[in-house]
Image (cartoon, grey):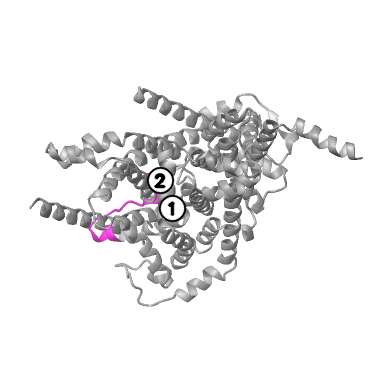
């Protein structure tokens, strides 16, 4: 008995060398994240790729999945709503990204070094970002009410005869959404810029002062070039983010009126979860994935060329 | 003279920015003021910033003790956001520990794979994730929301960045004292990471709390709704009673506002951290 007792642990010790043990523990620690990755990314992506070549209405069970080749993709290129969604996404990007970056940059510089009560401004501009976009959107939807809303009543008071109907007019629905999300998101952009500004050494500005540089010169010759990496980061994040916009549109307009504010992610939602065209919705998902992949690759290339 | 001019320009810029900041505060002030009003007074113009007649008790009751009362949404949101935050903290810090402080074959490959999956937009995998949840029998449960949100490549990455900066001396010393891997992880690594863990926790909580898309897709039963879905419900139920809608908005925003006011430094620094490192 004794012999076995002493032998076994020794044998175990040999097999479980410290390196093997460390590897086992390592994989154990990684296990949850690996499972998550396999389930939510690898499997999900492959499954959606397969579905995108199939026709399926969800209700008929797995046996109801019918392979139909590239029909979904052909349909997608002829679908007017998809075309509208793509142009809207582009328009939304153009309306929100450059303006947010420009405004936030100027505001961050002013808050960083040119105002009293820095913390007050940081907090106030950040309030909308921290608040839920749904609650914010609810407030704005009432403020922008076409006939009774305070904003249009104010515009009428100013003597503007036909103030815009904002969210309910196809001409202004997307613009209204762009305004609300810029308002809600600018605090984030300001905070990131301020973190970037904190890393710029004061010596540079002092040297420029000695050379007699003006404020404007300092802004364009020191601040803007040195914040380039931050601007790049924000540009990429916001560009990609603008193609993922969904919550605010789903809550405020549901893509309407007449698809005037529909976007790619909303098409996925509508086709998949309202019309139960799981195959077609998956094809649109791959369109979204392709767009984001191309944008990511393009911006990576830009960064590399920039660094070289 | 120069100093005087500098001060003058500082005052002017502060005033201009102050005026601009009002533009960011006004919707909040209007929301609060409307939540106190009678239905018919909300849209009266010019705006009564301080309501003449107050109906806050009625509005409060309608929101908090109505058909589907708000406290239920609160309970659901807290339950989901807390679970997601806790599990994310554990999973992400475990992975980050393995990625930084344990040596084994394949480690860096897994990390590379994980990072490369960060570019997959969650919206692009909505359909298959919905199907998986149905097959698992988790449709219309909070478990579905928790399962969808509890893995975070982004926070794993953030924690890994931080843990790389933790000196190995602590770990070597503990090893000599005979501490095992779990002990080292739990009683040395995690306490050293406390500031960044707090940041991750706050941000993950806020994101989960504010999420609209996942609850919209994975929940059906109104009793399970989170606050954001509850907001949509109120909007549809009280289409024209803007006072009640504003009370609901106020109720949805208030807890995060309090968290933010108390922890503003941590929240702001946490958000900035993601930006600088990314």
Can residue A302 be seen? Answer: yes
Check contact, mark 1 vs mark 2: CB within 8 A.
no
Residue at the limit of the structure toward the left, as seen here: B1
Residue at the limit of the structure toward the right, as seen here: A1
Mark 1 residue crowding within 10 angstroms, few (<14) / some (14–19) / many (20+): many
Dot 1 or dot 2: first in sequence order is: 1
Q: Whole-percent x and y of residue A172?
A: 36, 46
Mark 2 residue crowding within 10 angstroms, few (<14) / some (14–19) / many (20+): many
**Prevailing secondary structure class for the magenta stretch in the rendered image:** loop
Q: Chain of mark 1?
A: B
A186 is higher (above) or lower (below) than A83: below
Q: Read off the magenta span.
A: A154-171
Tag count in the figure? 2
Q: Whole-percent x and y of residue A118?
A: 29, 55
Query: What label does residue B267 carry, if any?
Result: 1
- For disc 2, the marked residue is B272
């Amino acid at each position: 008995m004794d012999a076995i007792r002493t032998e076994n642990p020794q044998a175990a010790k040999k097999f479980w060398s410290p390196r093997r043990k460390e590897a086992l523990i390592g994989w154990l620690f990684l296990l949850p994240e690996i499972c998550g990755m396999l389930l939510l990314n690898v499997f999900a992506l492959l499954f959606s790729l397969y579905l995108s070549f199939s026709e399926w209405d969800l209700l008929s069970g797995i046996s109801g999945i019918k392979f139909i080749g590239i029909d979904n993709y052909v349909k997608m290129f002829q679908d007017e709503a998809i075309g509208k969604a793509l142009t809207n996404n582009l328009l939304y990007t153009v309306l929100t990204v450059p303006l947010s970056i420009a405004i936030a940059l100027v505001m961050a510089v002013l808050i960083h070094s040119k105002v009293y009560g820095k913390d007050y401004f940081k907090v106030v501009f950040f309030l909308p970002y921290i608040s839920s976009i749904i609650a914010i959107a609810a407030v704005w939807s009432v403020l922008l009410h076409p006939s009774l809303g305070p904003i249009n009543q104010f515009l009428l008071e100013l003597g503007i005869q036909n103030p815009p109907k904002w969210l309910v007019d196809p001409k202004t629905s997307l613009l209204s959404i762009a305004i609300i999300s810029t308002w809600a998101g600018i605090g984030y952009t300001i905070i990131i810029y301020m973190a970037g500004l904190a890393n710029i050494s004061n010596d540079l500005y002092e040297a420029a002062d000695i050379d007699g540089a003006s404020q404007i010169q300092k802004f364009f010759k020191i601040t803007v070039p040195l914040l380039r990496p931050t601007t790049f980061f924000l540009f990429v994040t916001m560009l990609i983010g603008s193609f993922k916009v969904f919550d605010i549109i789903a809550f405020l307009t549901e893509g309407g009126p007449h698809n005037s504010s529909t976007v790619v992610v909303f098409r996925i939602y509508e086709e998949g979860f309202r019309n139960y065209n799981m195959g077609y919705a998956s094809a649109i998902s791959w369109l979204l994935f392709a767009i984001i992949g191309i944008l990511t690759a393009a911006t990576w290339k830009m960064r590399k060329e920039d660094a070289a | 003279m120069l100093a005087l001019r500098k001060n003058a320009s500082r005052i002017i810029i502060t005033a201009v920015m102050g005026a601009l900041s009002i533009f960011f505060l006004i919707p909040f002030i209007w929301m609060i003021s409307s939540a106190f009003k009678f239905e018919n007074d909300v849209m009266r113009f010019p705006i009564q910033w301080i309501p003449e007649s107050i109906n806050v008790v009625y509005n409060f009751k309608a929101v908090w003790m109505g058909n589907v009362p708000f406290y239920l949404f609160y309970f659901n949101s807290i339950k989901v956001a807390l679970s997601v935050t806790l599990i994310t903290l554990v999973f992400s810090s475990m992975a980050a520990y393995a990625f930084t402080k344990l040596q084994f074959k394949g480690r860096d490959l897994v990390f590379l794979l994980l990072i490369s999956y960060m570019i997959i937009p969650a919206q692009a995998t909505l359909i298959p994730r919905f199907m998986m949840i149905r097959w698992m029998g988790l449709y219309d449960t909070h478990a579905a929301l928790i399962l969808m949100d509890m893995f975070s490549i982004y926070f794993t990455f953030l924690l890994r960045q931080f843990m790389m900066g933790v000196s190995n001396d602590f770990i070597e010393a503990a090893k000599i004292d005979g501490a095992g891997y779990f002990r080292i992880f739990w009683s040395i690594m995690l306490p050293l990471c406390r500031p960044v863990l707090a940041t991750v926790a706050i941000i993950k909580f806020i994101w989960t709390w504010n999420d609209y898309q996942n609850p919209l897709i994975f929940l059906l039963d109104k009793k399970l709704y989170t606050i954001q879905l509850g907001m949509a419900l109120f909007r549809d139920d009280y289409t024209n009673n803007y006072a009640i809608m504003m009370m609901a908005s106020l109720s949805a925003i208030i807890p995060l506002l309090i968290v933010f006011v108390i922890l503003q430094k941590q929240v702001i620094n946490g958000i900035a951290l993601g930006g600088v490192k990314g």
